[in-house]
Amino acid sequence: MGMSNLTRLSEFILVGLSSRPEDQKPLFVLFLIMYLVTLVGNLLIVLAIRSDPKLQNPMYFFLSILSFADICYTTVVVPKMLVNFLSETKTISYAECLAQMYFFLVFGNIDSYLLAAMAIDRYVAICNPFHYVTVMNHRRCMLLVAFSTTFSCLHSLLHILLVNRLTFCASNVIQHFFCDVNPVLKLACSSTFVNEVVAMTEGMASVMAPCICIVISYLRILIAVFSIPSVAGKCKAFSTCSSHLTVVTLFYGSISYVYFYPLSRYTVKDRVATIIYTVLTSTLNPFIYSLRNKDMKRGLEKLIRRVKTQMDMLSTTQANKICGC
């Protein structure tokens, strides 16, 4: 095969989570349920926050953006995965593969920086409560979201351009369930040295920067909390951070396992770990943030009551029209 043909690869084949035919339908049902829970749960959080005046503060503003990003994050990966579970070909075009990789990196990085912004918000609320409204004003929150989005787009574009310059050998089989960077790089027959260097420097810095920010924020929070004399005060301070810490642990723990190793060590176990931060974390977020948060639970209950009331009114109106009343 000549080098001119190597750059004209038209499609890839996604192996998926399992190659056994008997596994495809159970996996389809499992991930369809998880996807629907993710969509409904995160959408309810966004609507509850937007519709409840008592949830109009920076913490819930960031949570609503995070929930929207989680919907987009899973939508980039799961629908194609569901189609492939029921398809025999399991192909994805070269352009579609690069697009999926780009948006996966974009929304993954947005999630990472939003989690850092939420840690900063908790730090200011606990360590500097009298200046909270001034420090975490709407303009500053919008700037944090704008920075997260802009940097994530530029970071992702860099990696896509580096992948696009590669040539690929005879094999077009991606040992994964979506077009992630490492599995695609393993198919390249041209040198991936630049890609790996950028991933281990700029890529690691883009992940570690928000992670370090989160660690520093929580160290300062711990120092402040331990200085609170009452046990009740300490518990109240910790309760405002527990949900966020749970999500951070799931998200960064799985990402560290997958990406902070050399390309040659990428194995099937990494596919399973990837599910945690691509699907599972987004599915669990609504439960983590709502079950242990009284304000969020109240907001969701108000939203459900409002929707139910509107549906009852609509049903009554339709019944009256049918009866000719």
Image: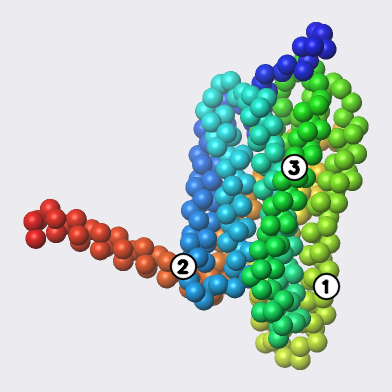
For label 2, the SS is helix
Q: Residue at x 80, y 47 (%)?
A: 257
Mark identifier at residue 219: 1
The structure residue drawn at horizontal position 59% and vertical position 73%, both measured from the top left corner, is 57
Earlier-in-chain disc, 2 versus 3: 2
Contact check, label 1 and label 3, Cβ < 8 Å: no
Q: Position of residue 321 (x, y in %)?
A: 14, 55
Which amino acid type is shown beneath numbered disc 1? Leu
Q: Are marks 2 and 3 in contact (CB under 8 Å)?
A: no
Q: State left or right for residue 203 relative to residue 61.
A: right
Q: Disc 1 on helix, strand or loop?
A: helix
So how many labels did they put on this image?
3
> Which callout, 1 or 3, points at the residue further toward the start of the chain?
3
**Would you say 168 lies left or right of 10 here?**
right
Which residue corresponds to mark 3?
Answer: 156
Q: Nearer the viewer, residue 79 or 37?
A: 79
Q: Is 64 situated left or right of 194 in this image? A: left
60 w.r.t. 27: above or below = below
Point 57% across, 29% down: residue: 84
CA gap between label 1 and label 3 equals 30 Å
Q: Which residue is the site of mark 2?
A: 51
Above-or-below relation of 144 to 174: below
